[in-house]
Amino acid sequence: MSTLEHLMQPIKIRSMELANRVVVPPMGTFLSNEEGMATDAYLAYAKRRVKSGAGLFIQEFTAVHPNGRALPSQLGIYKDDQIPGLKKIVDAVHAQGTKIAVQLHHAGRESMYNLRIGEAIAPSAIPSLVYGGNPREMTLDDIHEIIKAFGAAAVRAREAGYDAVELHSAHGFLLHQFLSTYSNQRTDEYGGDMLQRARFVIEVLREVRRQVGDDYPISIRLSVEEEIKNGFTAADMQKVAPELVKSGCDIIHASFGTHGSPAGITQAPIEYQPGFNVGLARKMKEVVNVPVIGVGRFNDPFIADECIARGDADLIVFGRQHLADPDFLQNAIKGKFEDTNQCLACNQGCIERAMYEQKSIRCAINPETGQELIYPTQSAEVSRNVWVIGAGPGGLTAAYEAARLGHKVTLFEKQNETGGQIRYASQAPFKEPYRVWINRLAGKAAKLGVDIKTGTEVTEQMIVDAKPYVVILATGGQEIIPPIEGIELPCVVSAMKVLNGEVAVGQNVVIIGAGLIGMETADYVVANGCQSVTLVEQSKKPPVKKATSHGYMLHKRLKGAAAQQIYGAEVTRIDNNSVIIKTEQAEQTLNQVDQVILAVGMKPLNELARVLKEQGIRHYVIGDAVKTRRIIEATEEGAKAAWDI
């Protein structure tokens, strides 16, 4: 095993000395207030991230101008009143021995908030690929104002004590918008070929350098590949990067993708291997002689060490991994990396929560993230007798958290192994890491003394006899069996039995239900030799959205496998070799069907709540036992139940 000798080497960049090559990248948390001020919540979040021992913490994208905010609750550095709060963040990070940079940002047209209020600006009046809406084309006065705003923000950063600044010229935001023909079709000096489109970025960089002086490090985050049809390429960026270095850039942060890139590539789903895109950093190293930061779903420091040893990059970003488990680096150094919860790239609490729910940051497998202020660190005053019923994600999280706080915990699971629905979901292509995570969580709970009783179904009488102090009911859900004629035929099987290997995959399969279970089951049967698969879904639109990263990949693979997806359809009858469906247009018969798989969803399984209430036993019902949802709801509810005891 690697000793991390390359990853842990120090590096000096102008006046900034880093203890190692590990970087916490800028990740939007939306933990600030409506005035763009730093809050205690963000301060606690930052402190927890740098406990990893990373050499550099790059503060999340921080607005340089009021009309450049992605949301009102985005951190700001556009007025002097914000400096004292920012200085608190700097001092907290420095206290951990980590250096800190702030990412200077302007959203341009990629702000749903500014588009809605009519204040979004962009190089050209072209709608956002994600949000739609029409931004206003920037005048030359606008351009000069924003250039000065970046310079003024850099001065505030230096005054607040930041060790460096980073310009956000990636992922479809304003500086990137000038580089891209998708957003810049200007005919003046700020439009034209790649180098002409880079003029705005270069002028921003020069202004920042002029304002902060020669000794102050400046990084620039670039999308080296735009990752969109007819977008700019690494070869294009190889022409621009040397000009950036000449203009004062000290670090190239080699990212990729833009708003509108397929599969949400900038938040790569689990289909992509850790380190998959570090080759773009090498392409930058071919043309510049400054340190280059590599990115690409890194969640393993040993893989990162190998990348640095090969010369692919000089520093490595660990983004979502710092959300999933900020102790990962220390675990690796101490030879206990098997204790680490590795990021699953599910995007539930980080990307999707921010983009689709407009809420602050969380992590589906780490309930502490974004909740550091309420996360209990001291043992409970009184150790209680706690029963947790159900050992899925919610139950295991509840058991672990309750035991961590000093309670005596018994965890009951009626199946012969822990894991709940994850045992089935992890069988789908690319999802083995889910099984690794759930098994590690069970192991960590056992180490804390949780008495895990598998193959044990809790009865009403057991509760009446034992009268535990508190019960956390995490019994999950049970499969819905729709009232369809022929549902009892031998060819009809449950998705869970197929995924668990109890039933062999058929050759010509119809799956009833195209939600996540149905889609992943289709993915599974295709990977296991099915010749044809048809998904039949009552909803008129796909329940699994292509806008999500994993959803996009599922749709892409099933399309490649020629899977048929029929929406707005109801199954009316199942025969031995056929399935009859009804749409608004007509009735249709699907022939030569040898297997029908049920994946119509789950309903809560919570009958024990009644007896708990009757017995007057304090209890919590969590996760799918309340309503069928995602991992993040189960783990957060499980954790909060444990914290509340």
Image (tube, grey):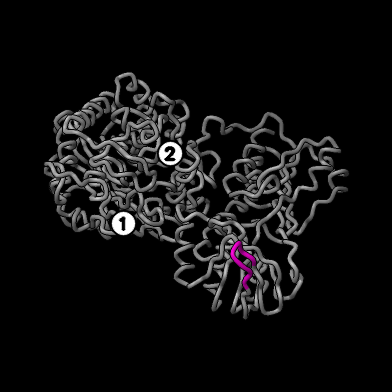
**Residue 372: percent from the left, percent from the top?**
51, 33
Q: Nearer the viewer, residue 500 or 13?
A: 500
Q: Nearer the viewer, residue 331 or 193?
A: 193
Question: What number is the disc on residue 125?
Answer: none
Above or below for 314 versus 212? below
Q: Residue at x 29, y 59 (%)?
A: 229
Q: Residue at x 81, y 40 (%)?
A: 612
Q: Quadrant of residue 203?
A: top left
- Residue 259 seen: yes
Q: Quadrant of residue 91?
A: top left
Is residue 610 found left or right of 111 in the rendered image? right
For label 2, the residue is 49
- CA neighbours of label 1 inside 10 A, class few (<14), some (14 to 19), many (20+): some
**What are the residue bounds of the magenta stretch?**
582-588
Q: Residue at x 60, y 61 (%)?
A: 584
Q: Earlier in the sequence, mark 2 or mark 1?
A: 2
**Residue 87: percent from the left, percent from the top?**
34, 24
Is residue 4 found left or right of 284 in the rendered image? right
Q: Residue at x 40, y 51 (%)?
A: 267
Badge 2 element: helix
Is residue 101 found left or right of 325 in the rendered image? left
- Image depth: mark 2 or mark 1 in front: 1
Quadrant where the image shows the N terminus: bottom left
Above or below for 630 versus 138? below
Badge 1 element: loop
**Residue type at mark 2?**
Arg
| Disc 2 to disc 1: CB gap under 8 Å | no
**Residue type at mark 1?**
Ile
**Residue 334: percent from the left, percent from the top?**
45, 49
Q: How many marks?
A: 2
Question: What number is the disc on residue 228?
Answer: 1
